[in-house]
Image: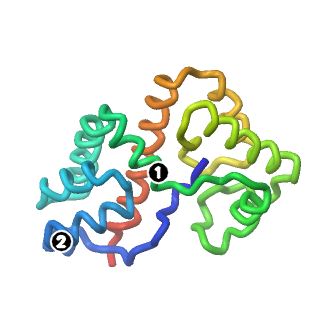
Amino acid sequence: MTSSSAASNPAPLTLAAFNKLSHTEATAQLLTCCTSSSWASQLASKRPFPVLETLFASSDSVWQEVQTQEADLLEALDGHPQIGNVATLKQKYRNTQDSAAHEQSGANDADDAVLAALAQGNQDYLDKFGFIFIVFATGKSAQHMLDLLLTRLPNDRDTELTTAAIEQNKITRLRLQKLLSAA
């Protein structure tokens, strides 16, 4: 399971400033949104973008191509922290000072039983599929995420790779929006 906030929160850039970065700098910024090096490099190569909507459409297009390569998809998923114990989950869901107020709303009051079930479910998922449970967490309570995890756990690996790719793209889009906010 993962949050939808970037691991390192870079300062917001304007689209114009992003377009002026070197390929290496732009790729580095994009890697804060999605850790697939192929996606980041390919998207950086498509600059300049006249408007954000063009960047988002290009990102979606590149992701559709990149995510078909399992190694690239797994590289993107590896960029998310694995949440594997109750203490980590308590910190994640009860300490919202480090995340935007709209992210994970309703999760602050998750009880210990839900958090313990999430920790166990995350481990069961990792053991079964070989990669972490990923979900676009914005607006979802801990109970809702547990319900999603338990619903997805019986799936086969191919179904989960497809679902993870969809969830990763949602997270990437949100991170791109945050990265390229008006400075």
Local SS, label 2 = helix
Question: Closer to the camera: disc 1 or disc 2?
Answer: 1
Question: Where residue 50 sits in the image (x, y, percent)?
Answer: 14, 59
Q: In the rendered structure, which disc, 1 or 2, sits on the residue that comes first in sequence?
A: 2
Which residue appears at 11% of the width and 61% of the height? 48
Q: Which amino acid, mark 2?
A: Ala
Indicate which disc residue 78 carries.
1
Q: Quadrant of the C terminus?
A: bottom left
Location of residue 86 in the rendering, given as x and y in whole percent from the top left corner: 79, 56
Q: Amino acid at mark 1?
A: Asp
Q: Is residue 120 above or below residue 28?
A: above
Q: Left or right: where does residue 20 sit relative to residue 66?
A: left
Count of labels in the image: 2
Alpha carbons under labels 1 and 2: distance apart: 30 Å
Say which of 127 and 76 sits in front.
Answer: 127
Please name the colour scheme applied to the rendered image.
rainbow
Q: Tell me where residue 16 sits by quadrant.
A: bottom left
Residues at circles 1 and 2 in contact by the CB criterion of under 8 Å: no
Residue at left offset 14%, top offset 72%: 22
Seen in the image, is 173 located left or right of residue 117? left
Residue at figure coordinates x 33%, y 61% from the top left = 31
Identify the image quadrant of residue 144: top right
